[in-house]
Image (spheres, helix red, strand yellow):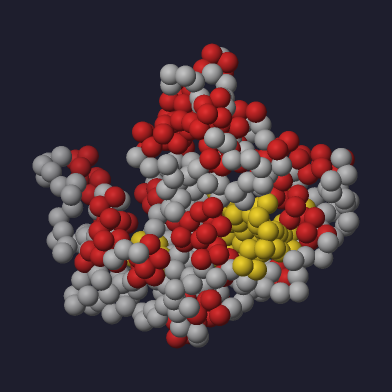
C-alpha cells in the first residue's frame, strides 16, 4: 500500500503556507509515501538474515533503513537507536541532520573482545539483542562500503567512574585503593557495554509462551500502528522496538566472566531515576545499586570479576508518570502508606503490578558468556527464576543489608518479601504488613 504522490498535507492549492510545507517535505523525502511493504511486492529483496547462524557472514547484518536505496533491502522492522529514534527524526526535520547521513565508524571498534560464545548461535538463548551488533566494522564492512545503512546496536568502551558513595566506602575501610580496580584517587576502572534492543520475534514469542501472530498484533496496536509491517511483512522476523536498552558495567577483567575458575558477583538492576540519580528514599534502588558496585569491586580486587547490568525499565517498566501517580495514591489512601496495600495501589493505576517480565533479561548474560553466578545481589524471584531457567547457575543469593534501607522504603521491601521476594530474615505476616507504614502525606508536604 502506498499513499501515491499526494502528501497528507495537501489542501487548497492556493494556500501558500501549505505549499511551502510540501516543498520542505519533498526536499527531504521522495514525494511518494510508502506506508508499508509486502513480501511479493516489486523491488522487495531483503538482504538474507539467518538468526542463530554460527558464521556472522551467513547470519548477515540487521538492516532497518527506509531510504530509497535500502527500502527493498531491509530485513528488519523498526528503527535504529531504540527510544532515541524519535530525536533523530526531529534532527532531520529541523535540518540539523541529513536523512542520508552515513556514520564514520573508523576508530569506534570495541575496546575489549567478547565471545563468540555458543549462545550467540542459539536462536533460543538470545532473542532480544543482536549478538553481532558490536561487530559491524569487523564483519559487515562490505555492506557499509556498498552504501547499505548498517549500524551497530552494541558498543564497548572503557571508563573511570567517580562516586561520592565509593569515596565514603573507602574512608570507612569497606574498600581500598589498590591502583588496579580502584585508583589512588578513588576512581573505579570499568569496561562498559551498551546494547539497544533487537527482537527476534519468533524467539520472543516462544519465550513468553504466545504465538508470534498475537505478539505482532499487540505490538502493532499498542504503538498506534506505528509499524504496519508487523502485520504486512511476516517474512521479516526481526524488530527493533522504540524502547530503552541496557548498559553493563564490568569490574575487573571481562575475560574472567566465562571462566569457571573465577568468581563472579552480579547485580541486574532496573532503572529508577528518582532513587538512582536523585536519591529519593521511598525505595531501596540506589542503596542496592551502590552496595552492588561495592561488592563487584571487592570481588574484582579478590581476583574475580563483578558485573552490574543496568536496564532502562523505569518504574517496573510502567514509566515514571505512572510511578508518581502511584506514589500519590499510596500516600493519600485511607490508613496511610502501608505495606499491605503496596501492590494494590499499583494495580489500581496500571492494571498490573510489574511489566518488566524478566523473560528476556538473561539474554545479555548469555552474550557475556555467563555460566555461573557465585553471588547474585538481588531479592527478586522473577530475576532469579529467569536466570536459572535459562540454564545459568546461581550459587548464592544476597539481599541488601538491613542498615542500608531508608526508613520510608520499608513499605516496599516488606511488601515484596511477603509477596515472595528472597530474604534471609523473617517473612512478614498479614498483620505485620498493616503495621509497616511510610511517611504520611503531611510529612512530605512542602
Residue 278 appears in the picture as rendered: no
Residue 422 visible to the viewer? yes
Asked where in the image residue 278 lies, by quadrant, the reply is top right
Picture quarter with the N terminus: bottom left
Q: Residue at x 23, y 64 (%)?
A: 231
Q: Nearer the viewer, residue 372 or 227?
A: 372
Residue visible at 25% across and 76% down in the picture: 44
7 relative position to 297: left or right: left
- Choose top left, top right, bottom left or bottom right for residue 17: top left
Who's the residue at 84% across and 49% down the image? 175
Q: Position of residue 122 (x, y in %)?
A: 48, 78
* Place of residue 313 in the rendered image (x, y in percent of width and height, measured from the top left): 49, 48
| Above/below status of 307 relative to 293 | below
Say which residue appears at 13% left-offset and 43% top-offset: 11
Count of labels shown?
0
Residue 270: percent from the left, percent from the top? 55, 48
Left or right of 300? Residue 157 is: left
285, above or below 309, in the image: above
Amino acid at each position: 500500500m502506498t499513499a501515491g504522490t499526494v502528501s497528507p498535507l495537501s489542501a487548497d492549492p492556493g494556500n501558500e503556507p501549505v505549499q511551502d510545507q510540501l516543498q520542505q517535505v519533498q526536499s527531504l523525502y521522495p514525494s511518494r509515501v510508502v506506508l508499508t511493504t509486502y513480501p511479493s511486492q516489486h523491488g522487495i529483496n531483503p538482504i538474507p538474515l539467518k538468526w542463530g547462524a554460527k558464521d556472522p557472514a551467513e547470519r548477515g547484518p540487521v538492516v532497518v533503513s527506509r531510504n530509497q536505496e535500502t527500502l527493498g533491502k531491509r530485513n528488519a522492522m523498526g528503527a535504529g537507536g531504540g527510544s532515541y529514534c524519535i530525536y533523530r527524526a526531529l534532527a532531520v526535520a529541523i535540518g540539523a541532520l541529513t536523512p542520508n547521513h552515513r556514520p564514520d565508524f573508523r576508530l569506534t571498534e570495541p575496546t575489549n573482545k567478547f565471545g563468540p560464545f555458543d549462545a550467540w548461535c542459539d536462536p533460543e538463548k538470545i532473542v532480544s539483542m543482536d549478538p553481532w551488533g558490536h561487530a559491524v566494522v569487523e564483519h559487515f564492512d562490505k555492506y557499509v562500503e556498498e552504501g547499505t545503512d548498517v549500524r551497530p546496536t552494541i558498543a564497548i568502551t572503557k571508563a573511570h567512574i567517580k562516586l561520592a558513595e565509593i569515596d565514603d566506602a573507602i574512608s570507612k575501610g569497606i574498600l581500598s585503593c589498590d591502583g588496579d580496580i580502584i585508583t589512588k584517587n578513588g576512581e573505579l576502572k570499568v569496561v562498559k557495554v551498551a546494547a539497544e534492543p533487537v527482537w527476534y520475534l519468533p524467539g520472543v514469542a516462544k519465550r513468553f509462551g504466545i504465538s508470534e501472530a498475537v505478539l505482532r498484533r499487540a505490538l502493532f496496536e499498542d504503538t498506534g500502528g506505528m509499524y504496519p509491517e508487523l502485520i504486512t511483512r511476516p517474512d521479516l522476523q526481526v524488530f527493533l522496538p522504540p524502547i530503552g536498552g541496557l548498559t553493563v558495567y564490568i569490574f575487573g577483567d571481562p575475560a574472567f566472566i566465562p571462566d569457571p575458575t573465577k568468581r563472579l558477583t552480579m547485580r541486574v538492576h532496573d532503572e529508577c531515576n528518582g532513587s538512582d540519580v536523585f536519591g529519593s528514599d521511598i525505595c531501596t534502588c540506589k542503596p542496592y545499586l551502590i552496595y552492588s558496585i561495592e561488592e563487584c569491586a571487592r570481588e574484582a580486587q579478590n581476583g574475580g570479576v563483578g558485573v552490574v547490568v543496568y536496564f532502562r525499565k523505569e518504574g517496573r517498566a510502567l514509566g515514571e508518570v505512572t510511578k508518581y501517580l502511584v506514589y500519590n495514591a499510596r500516600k493519600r489512601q485511607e490508613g496511610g502508606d502501608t505495606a499491605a496495600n503496596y501492590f494494590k495501589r499499583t494495580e489500581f493505576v496500571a492494571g498490573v503490578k510489574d511489566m518488566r517480565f524478566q523473560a528476556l533479561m538473561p539474554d545479555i548474560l548469555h552474550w557475556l558468556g555467563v555460566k555461573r553466578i557465585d553471588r547474585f545481589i538481588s531479592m527478586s524471584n522473577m530475576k532469579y527464576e529467569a536466570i536459572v531457567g535459562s540454564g545459568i547457575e546461581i550459587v548464592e543469593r544476597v539481599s541488601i543489608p538491613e542498615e542500608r534501607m531508608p526508613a520510608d522504603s520499608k513499605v516496599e521491601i516488606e511488601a515484596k518479601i511477603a509477596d515472595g521476594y528472597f530474604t534471609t530474615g523473617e517473612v512478614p505476616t498479614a498483620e505485620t504488613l498493616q503495621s509497616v507504614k511510610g511517611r504520611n502525606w503531611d510529612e512530605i508536604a512542602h
